[in-house]
Structure formats: C-alpha cells, structure tokens
Image (spheres, grey):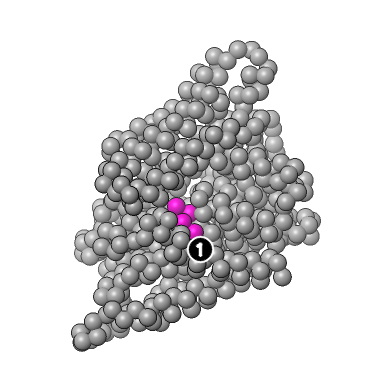
Amino acid sequence: MRNALLLTLVLWLAIPFIANASTDALPDNPEIAASSEVIQDNGHQEPAEGHTTDDHATPGESHDAAPPGWTVIPFVLLLSMIATGPLFYEHFWHKNYPIIAVSLATIVVLYYLFALHNAHAPVHALAEYVQFIALLASLYIASGGIMINVDKKATPMANVLLLVVGAVIANLIGTTGASMLLIRPFIRLNKSRIRPYHIIFFIFMVSNIGGALTPIGDPPLFLGFLKGVPFMWTLEHNVLPWALALVILSAIFYVFDSRNKDEDLFDEVEYTNKTSIIGTRNFFWLALIIASVFLDPNVIEGVPAIVYEGQKFSFLRELIMLSVGFLSYKLADKKAITGNEFNFEPIREVAFIFVGIFGTMMPALALVSEFAQSDAGASLIGPNSLYWGTGVLSGFLDNAPTYLNFLAAALASQGGDINAIANVQDYAAGGVYEQSVINLTAIAVGAVFFGAMTYIGNGPNFMVKSIAEQTGIHMPSFFGYILRYSIPILLPIFVVVWLVFFVF
C-alpha cells in the first residue's frame, strides 16, 4: 500500500514516453490524428508574452473536444467514497483508501493515454500534483517543528482574536502555512472545551477565506499573479469582501463559543497570559519555503526547468521545498516535535486522497473549460455567473485550475488571451475590457472563499481535519460538514457578499 503512490508517480513520469509510442502507432488518417489531440491545459505554464503557436493550447482550451461525459464517473465515485467511507464503512475505507484513490486515478490516466492519445492533460495533472504536494508537505513538516503555547484562558474573544490573526498571517505564509502553524496551538488553547465547531471555523477563516488578500495567500491567486495580475491587485480589490466575511464569521463564532459552558468551572487555574515558542529556528525554514514559491521558470529567466512540448515545468522549486522540509525535520527542536505530537499520517492521507482527485478530475475540468469558452458559456460571462460558477466548482475541484479556466473564458469572451501577460494586466486594470475588474474580483473571491465549502475544497482543509481527529476530536463526515456548517453558515454569508459587492 505504501508503494501505491510511488507506482502512480512512476506511471505519470512515464506518460510522455508512453504517449509518444502510442501516437507513433496511429495510422495516417487526418480524422484520427485530429481526434487524438484532445488536450486540456490548466494553465500552469505559459509561452512568452503575446506568443502562441499551434503547439500550445490556451489554458482550459482543448485542441479538439473535451472527453465524453461518462469519464467523470471515477471522479464522482471517488468523491462519493470520500463522503460515505468514514461514515458507513470506516474500517474498509481507512484500510483501503490509498488503493482506491490510486486505482481510480490510474484508470483515468490510462484512458487519456491509450483511448484519447492525450499525454498533455496527464502531464499537467502530474505537474500540478507535484507542485501541490511539495508545498503542502514542506509547510506541514516545517511548521511541525514550531510549538506555540498560549497560556491564557480560552475565552470566546481570545479565540476570535487567534482566528483573525491567523487569517491575516495566511496572506504572508499562505493558508497552508498559517493552518499548520496555528491549528495545534488553537487546539491546546481550548483543550478543556474543544468542540468540532472550533475546527470548522478555523477551516473557514484561516485555511480559506483568510488568504484572499495576496497571491501568497492561496494558490489560485498566485497563478493569477504569474499570469499578469499585479501583486497588490488582490489586496486592493478583495479586502472589503474579505473583511465583511471575516466580521460575520467572527460574530457567529463568538455566539457559538459563548454558549460553550462545558469547561470545568470548579477547576481553578492560574494563567500567565504569555505566549511561548519552541523551535523558532523553523521560522527560517518556513521563510525559505515561501521564498522558493517565486522560483517559477515561466517568470524568471534562467531557472532550470523540464521542457515538454515547448512548455516549462518547474522542478528546482519543488526540490528546494522538499529538501527544506527534510532538513527542517532532521534539525528541529525535539521538544517541539514531541509537544506537537508530530507524525506524518495527515500529510500521507492528503497525498493519497489528492493523487486520486488530481488524476480523476481531468475530464471534469475539461468539460467545464469547454463550456466556459463555448458560445453558450461566453454569453453568460458576468460577475454573477463568474462568482457562483468559480465558487461552486472550487468547492469540489481544485480551485487553482478552476480560477484559470474561468479567467481564460472571461478574457476570451472579449477577445483577450490569458497567455498574453499584457492582456491579463489590461483586464486587471480595467478600462480596456468591459466590467473586467468586477469580473476578476468575482473569480478571485469565488475561488478562495468557496474552497471552505467542503473538506476537499482546499488542501489545508483535509490536513486540519486529520490533525484534529488525531487529537481525539470527532469531526463531522463529508456530508455532515456541508449540511451542518457550510450550507447554514457559509452559504448565507456568500450570498451577502454577492449582493453587496456584485449585485448592488
């Protein structure tokens, strides 16, 4: 079982060679050759500014057509099992979820290679997965060597302040970094009164909505920055929706926490009201990881890259992240590691679950992209459809390619090209394209905010859940999270944000 993930990565690494062999075997039939070019590019790489060739697909664009609709079945099946497994067949699921996730991903990858003769989409899925897991794993490991202990009474106001501080920090070290750094202190602070709602609101505020102000905060915003959206654009245009959502969530959480009277009132405890930190050296490792995020070969000339079909895929950045993660663990303060009860199970669970998600969601993203850039989809382009379309899909698909697909569609509907940095800059600046600023704000806010709607909407969500469960907190199931918290709490807030900033 432990080798299943490795075997899948080996298969993905062999994709270009397998695809070349299968393509060479095709007959010289123009129709077959055309049908073999079903390519969906999620936009992590780009040609030089303003430069496109027949060998490059626009992000989200397929060279011929999206795969048939039934190919989303493995993705739907995986989501269904993630939702029902821990609830109805817990022992089987926890024992076999790595095999299930890897097997479903392998089925889709093999179909792309041998039925569609398309290596482009699997290669991009592999690149995205490696980038995703390298960042999450390195941040998880480095933060595990930092033990923050807040010695004060866990009052509702103290909890609100910690959550708001976490939301701010998320814009400096990313939602993943902030989540991994603060979830254990948050649990320790509330050790005598911890409840699932504490973890849920932490996911809402720190792991998702908090990171809406800078490109560092959340992956879709960083990809927008790489495509040409100015670094400070997100702060300027997202700050009011960000503030409104956090104020409402803070108020709701305060009401929840004020009603939590389970703490032993007869236990007289003296607090120093001080905060102590063990393992401060790991802040240096965290800084290295965050700095390495900007080593993108498509932005900085001279950065080594793997070139495939004329496109650059980063590997130096990922090697640095994983190396820093290894060093941060080996050189960490053992008191911090022990105090945090650090282990690798949460990141292992994320690695397997998301190898399945990245592998099986390719057809779903391709179908979304095809519709978004069709005449019917283009006719629906506007802040309302972009906010809800990007948002709802970001709750179940990876929000980074979803963001890029809708941005590509919005640009294409007005004759722009997401691969031309000047076009993206003009779109973000407004004036050249009609309603471009509000459209881009709708895409950005939808992608970041709605990641909190499900456990799989954003990478940190699943890790926070796993860490909480390891400490003995009984977290709600996939559907329980949505039905008990996301829909009654988040959805009305998102409606308010929509009405205030995109309707009125």
In terms of depth relative to the viewer, which is nearer, 411 or 204? 204
- Residue at 64% across / 66% down in the picture? 498
Check disc 1 and report its element: helix, strand or loop: helix
Q: Position of residue 287 (x, y in %)?
A: 41, 60
Where is residue 445? Give x, y as percent.
59, 61
Q: In the displayed structure, would residue 91 be above or below residue 187?
A: above
Residue drawn at (54%, 34%), measured in percent from left and top?
70
Q: Quadrant of the C terminus?
A: bottom right
Specify whether 66 is left or right of 199.
right
Q: Is residue 126 above or below residue 335?
A: above
**Residue 364 is drawn in which quadrant?**
top right
Stretch of the chain drawn in magenta: 452-458
List x then y, in percent, for residue 318.
Answer: 43, 45
Q: Taken as a whole, is the magenta stretch helix, strand or loop?
A: loop
Q: Please, what is the three-letter code of the amino acid marked with disc 1? A: Ile
Q: Which residue is mark 1?
A: 487
Q: Is residue 266 left or right of residue 182?
A: left
